[in-house]
Image: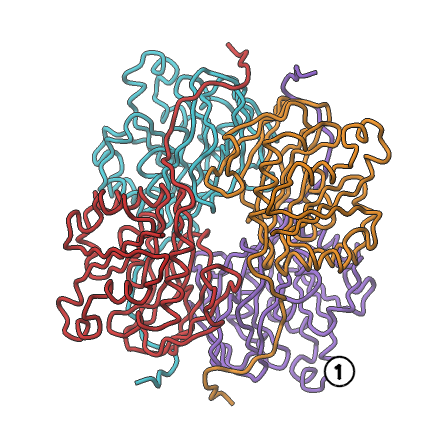
Chain colours: A purple, B orange, C red, D cyan
Amino acid sequence: MIRVTIWNEFIHEQQEEAVRALYPDGIHGALASGLRTDDLRFECVTMDDPDQGLSEAVLNRTDVLVYWAHWGHARMEDVNVRRAAECVRNGMGLVVLHSGHYSKLFQTLCGTTCALEWRAVGEKERVWCVAPDHPIAEGVPQTFVVPHSEMYGEPFDIPEDAKPVFMSWFEGGNVFRSGITLKRGFGRIFYFEPGHEKYPIFYQPEVLRVIGNAVRWAAPRYRGVHTTPKVENLEPIRTE
Amino acid sequence: MIRVTIWNEFIHEQQEEAVRALYPDGIHGALASGLRTDDLRFECVTMDDPDQGLSEAVLNRTDVLVYWAHWGHARMEDVNVRRAAECVRNGMGLVVLHSGHYSKLFQTLCGTTCALEWRAVGEKERVWCVAPDHPIAEGVPQTFVVPHSEMYGEPFDIPEDAKPVFMSWFEGGNVFRSGITLKRGFGRIFYFEPGHEKYPIFYQPEVLRVIGNAVRWAAPRYRGVHTTPKVENLEPIRTE
Amino acid sequence: MIRVTIWNEFIHEQQEEAVRALYPDGIHGALASGLRTDDLRFECVTMDDPDQGLSEAVLNRTDVLVYWAHWGHARMEDVNVRRAAECVRNGMGLVVLHSGHYSKLFQTLCGTTCALEWRAVGEKERVWCVAPDHPIAEGVPQTFVVPHSEMYGEPFDIPEDAKPVFMSWFEGGNVFRSGITLKRGFGRIFYFEPGHEKYPIFYQPEVLRVIGNAVRWAAPRYRGVHTTPKVENLEPIRTE
Amino acid sequence: MIRVTIWNEFIHEQQEEAVRALYPDGIHGALASGLRTDDLRFECVTMDDPDQGLSEAVLNRTDVLVYWAHWGHARMEDVNVRRAAECVRNGMGLVVLHSGHYSKLFQTLCGTTCALEWRAVGEKERVWCVAPDHPIAEGVPQTFVVPHSEMYGEPFDIPEDAKPVFMSWFEGGNVFRSGITLKRGFGRIFYFEPGHEKYPIFYQPEVLRVIGNAVRWAAPRYRGVHTTPKVENLEPIRTE
């Protein structure tokens, strides 16, 4: 049983009628519903929860954190971001969605700005799987369309060890590494670009399949802490 | 002319007689002397300087930051660390030495803890060049000895895109990726492990050669900022 | 002075009127003309030359090999391919163009099949620079169009250490990592996708700029051979 | 049930009394015995078998190929090497042992020479796990000794995407990336350095544990072939 915590900042749904209508239970509710299977157990938290949803208690009972954020990036407190980042390095999985690329949490783990170009006009997006043998690609068509999407375009300021699983074509001419995996410490991280709050993207079967696969892929197989211990020599030292 | 700023926290030299005797001008002074050539111009700063030595003024006139830190890691203020990290991502080169692996600056850029094992008994270290064609290896022997060193041992919690240029053998049985390159944004980063303050390591010709090479390798060829601009479509969008 | 050898299989130009009309001096002639600058010295060879153009003599006087191939892949003899691959590992630079992705030479160095999807209908291609600070991107617009191109699409079976410098958008909906760098031994390799023989792509200033930059980037800074020598111990061995 | 084929060139055991005494059933027999568990099914082949042990029939019933080779590298026929390499790219796992680093098979898949330094005097080797969370490291001590080993030392000419899981310290002063993972097409590859035929290394529990873990890690989760199909456009093309 994989314990999945879906963290959604939950600002748009509360401030924009159109988004609330689209996601009456919040993006987090839609994800929990859409991803529901016997092997996944869900908990939803938002920025309004204690420690902005990233409390020690919540993180301690989280195997994989799914993270959607947008307008609230600047309001995230360093102490909460650091706590979550440390959990990832200690083994907790992380699946970052859409505008979460610019979250302090994802930037902290990448070490880069994760900057990109964008355009929110609802253009068509075509997602391609570039690593068909990757577990995250299982059961996902070689290519699928997000009929209305927010364009995220290259250049994408991510580290060189970010491996592409999906790449996207946008009607307006842009391209993007839309699904990338990363490892930080013992934690597996997957970033997936589709997910603009104005469109029913989190109801799309292919999108849900990718996120579900990513959750299973990111689930910890190993947990540990990184320490800097003083150690004894195991081979003789003759140097004075 | 490459403008090199040597940042040294300058705590040991002021608190420990043995270190002061070894480095009367501070580690920074020794490095500036040892690296002095016609194409490098040096400025030295310490933690005692304004903004802990990482002020906007200093960083703006820095092409490559050389960074030695140890006891002062926790005292570095986030605002100063972030300013320096942003400069690296914008193109400033960074050469991190020895205990600087655990500095907030290096950890911030790596996104990992940079943890390792250690032992300070003055054992022998043998450094091997594993990438003889790398510019940082130019003029450096295939292998050289640091007669008395502080052991840093694997596992070293660094990102997968850290490429080894040097690897070390320690008399007490440990091994370590002792020279690694990394890229963050437009900035080139090199970490070099030898440099324990109790030994005359920064007077060693091979060590100085490596650091000098690293400074030249890390010097910016491109400077820019990472923004997330809204852009117009370059291809027609027919989707409503 | 960088000694550039342009290797073109020279089959299309001799067999297809349309291609001959477009490239009366062969693709190699057009490249040599288009890339001509004071710091580059060109030699052109084709499959019809001794040792299929990859003779010891030619390779010994080559700093960077530029390689365009298509129909002749299967006819390349292993001995010639191996000679060229060894030169790359020993430091010779390699710039592989378009259909050269499926050459024995490129496959040998990658270790992968370098397979991809394709469509030759002359659709529009938009090339994006995803690494603006890369030397190969110098003076190249952030994005440019190849008005008529042959689509090469993902998935592209290349090794994980292939770093993207350019990515392309194709009118028909595909995406592709259209400019990638790779290192094999001491040799720098760049693969660039645009260059279908039926279109005047090698007269396009942006394309020529990329290839010229790639030649300079790939020029050897170090040459060596890889041997497996038996060596003496440098530290005492007490084990019986 | 993972079908493991152990390929051993089987030259040393037949030509050297000391090796035959140590491995009366051949290195392959010792490995099959040592690795035997309920979930692994073994088949052993040698260079003396049809198609040098790498026949279509054998490969078709192989999930993971374990490969020990040394003196016979030059005698391996290209057609057999290519068949095996293709199977790896199509998903078959590969575990290469010791002197197999210089096999045509491993070189073909790496695209590099895989050259290194060596010394066969039976010195002590200390293996370190540098990726404790890796599946191949499961149940393996953080460090263990091979009492008598053949030294393999850096520089090791392997591709940049080879990720270290183990690194070794040798009594005579050398270091080496002694356990590395690589991906080629759909195939997972692990190279493990300990295994000189003159010592009982393949009876060592830690060594057997690593190899057993590697077999399970490398077992195919996906099989496919890499083709270069001509495809139809999925988005409208308006270009003439």
Please identify the quarter of the rendering in which residue C225 is found. Answer: top left
Task: Please state the horizontal and vertical placement of residue B149, each as a whole percent of the image.
Answer: 68, 27
- Image quadrant for the C terminus of chain D? bottom left
Amino acid residing under circle 1: Gln
In percent of the image, x 60 and y 55: which residue is there? B187
B189 with respect to D214 (left or right)? right
| Image quadrant in which the N terminus of chain D is located | top left
| Chain letter, disc 1 residue | A
Q: Of residues C39 and B235, which is closer to you in this image?
A: C39
Residue farthest to the top? C240
The residue pinned by badge 1 equals: A15
Q: Can residue D192 be seen in this view?
A: yes
Is C45 displayed left or right of B63 in the figure?
Answer: left
| Residue B7 sits above or below residue D46 on the image | below
Count neighbours of disc 1 (C-alpha within 10 A) and say few if under 14, some if 14 to 19, many if 20 or more.
few
Q: In this view, does A145 lie to the left or right of D72?
A: right
**Residue located 84% across and 30% down the image:** B16
